[in-house]
């Protein structure tokens, strides 16, 4: 069967290549990936909403996430080299830092997310180590063992509550997901859920030790500048991931019966966005209701639910993430939509 270059590959690999060139060449090159990741995507989203995929665009389902994972680690090394070792002016380094941070917050996080849902060992390990490199390895456990079964409930730290600002959510979700993921791993291994003992057989050992290893390597490569650069990029990646969680589940809840049993996860427990460029850039992650219905479903097979069954974001995910940084404007836009959706589907929630 002939393999064709997919739209997913084109959209994700273009900023990957531009970042590599920008890191090596310097000058005005960093403006290209920065403009692509921070500006052009929003423009394309507004022009090409709901563009359907053709069969040829489903060709790299299995290969692309692995390729992007390898590119992630190469770009991470390039970032430390270009930002902490090379002697380029700040006018080059600032846009390059922002471009790398946006890439890790979007493409890398989406790649890691896709891979940790794979059943094969190698893809899963690649995804896990992407999150470890962001100093956020515990997301590998918390996302699969806590977020998916308990989304839209009080038991999920990564579901944003109604009227909760992103900044309050960030603090609560970071700490809460770390603890909830550890408790879930303890339960899986037959240990008390509240145990804080972490031995080498616990995935949390690799999350913590791996994070320390990346920090040490960044320091050895670039000194204190390398360490601070690495921490800054990791914080941008973490912020991007938590912004995504905030936007995709804000205010949506599942009802809980008198016996404590939760209602099944339904399409109306996630916010969705069909915007063409962003969903290709993030491997269809904005088609979120379908992902929660079948977490192991390949990203190229995800589809958007109609507005009658699943809530849709008013703007593309990137625009909504920017709006989320302004709590007053966010509530003005989203609170009426949450209330309207709850009223329309009260019998289901």
Image (spheres, grey):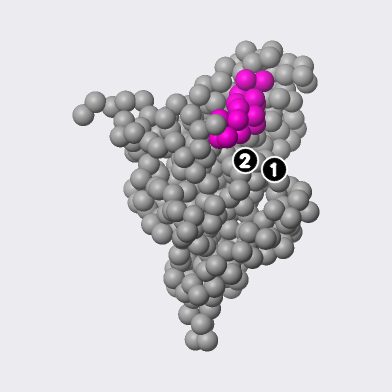
Q: Which residue is mark 1?
A: 322
Residue at 52% from the left image edge and 21% from the top image edge: 17
Q: CA distance from mark 2 to mark 1?
A: 6 Å
Q: Position of residue 219 (x, y in %)?
A: 68, 33
Seen in the picture, residue 321 relative to 345 is either above or below; the reply is above
Which residue occupies 54% across, 52% down? Answer: 312
Looking at the picture, tell me which residue is in the foreground, 59 or 83: 59
Query: Which residue is located at x 44 percent, y 36 percent?
Result: 51
Can residue 276 be spotted in the picture? yes
Taking the magenta stretch, the answer to whether it contains residue 139 is no
Numbered badge on residue 254: none
Quarter of the image for residue 94 reads: top right
Q: Say few, some or many: other residues with alpha carbon within 10 Å of mark 1 (under 14 / 14 to 19 / 20 or more).
A: few
Secondary element at image label 2: helix
How many numbered marks have been drawn onto this rendered protein structure? 2
How many residues crowd around disc 2 within 10 Å: few (fewer than 14), some, or many (20 or more)? many
State the extent of the magenta-drawn residues as a range. 31-46
Q: x, y percentage for residue 327? A: 76, 53
Q: Main secondary structure of the magenta part?
A: helix
> 280 left or right of 326?
left
Image quadrant in which the N terminus is located: top left
Taking depth in this image into account, of 183 and 146 the one nearest to the observer is 146
Q: Is residue 80 left or right of residue 200?
A: right
Q: Is residue 134 visible?
A: no
- Residue 318: mark in rendering: 2
Q: SS of the residue at dot 1?
A: helix
Kindly indicate whether the residue at mark 1 contacts the one at mark 2 (C-beta within 8 angstroms).
Answer: yes
């Amino acid at each position: 069967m002939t393999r064709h270059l997919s739209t997913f590959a084109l959209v994700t690999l273009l900023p990957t290549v531009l970042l590599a060139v920008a890191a090596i060449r310097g000058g005005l090159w960093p403006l290209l990936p920065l403009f692509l990741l921070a500006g052009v995507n929003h423009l394309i989203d507004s022009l090409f909403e709901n563009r359907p995929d053709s069969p040829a665009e489903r060709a790299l389902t299995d290969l692309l996430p692995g390729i992007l994972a390898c590119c992630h680690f190469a770009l991470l090394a390039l970032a430390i080299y270009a930002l902490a070792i090379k002697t380029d002016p700040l006018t080059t380094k600032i846009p390059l830092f922002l471009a790398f941070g946006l890439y890790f917050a979007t493409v890398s996080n989406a790649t890691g997310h896709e891979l940790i849902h794979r059943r094969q060992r190698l893809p899963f390990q690649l995804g896990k180590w992407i999150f470890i490199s962001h100093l956020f390895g515990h997301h590998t456990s918390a996302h699969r063992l806590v977020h998916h079964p308990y989304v839209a409930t009080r038991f999920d730290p990564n579901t944003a509550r109604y009227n909760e600002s992103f900044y309050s959510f960030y603090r609560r979700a970071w700490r809460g997901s770390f603890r909830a993921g550890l408790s879930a791993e303890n339960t899986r291994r037959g240990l008390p859920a509240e145990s804080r003992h972490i031995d080498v057989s616990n995935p949390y050992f690799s999350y913590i030790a791996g994070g320390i290893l990346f920090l040490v390597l960044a320091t050895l490569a670039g000194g204190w500048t390398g360490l601070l650069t690495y921490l800054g990029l990791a914080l941008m990646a973490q912020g991007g991931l938590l912004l995504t969680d905030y936007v995709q589940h804000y205010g949506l809840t599942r009802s809980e019966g008198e016996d404590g049993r939760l209602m099944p996860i339904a399409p109306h427990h996630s916010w969705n966005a069909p915007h063409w460029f962003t969903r290709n850039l993030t491997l269809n992650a904005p088609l979120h209701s379908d992902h929660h219905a079948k977490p192991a479903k390949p990203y190229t097979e995800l589809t958007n639910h109609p507005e009658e069954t699943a809530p849709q974001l008013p703007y593309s995910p990137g625009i909504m993430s920017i709006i989320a940084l302004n709590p007053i404007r966010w509530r003005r836009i989203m609170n009426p939509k949450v209330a309207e959706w709850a009223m329309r589907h009260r019998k289901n929630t």
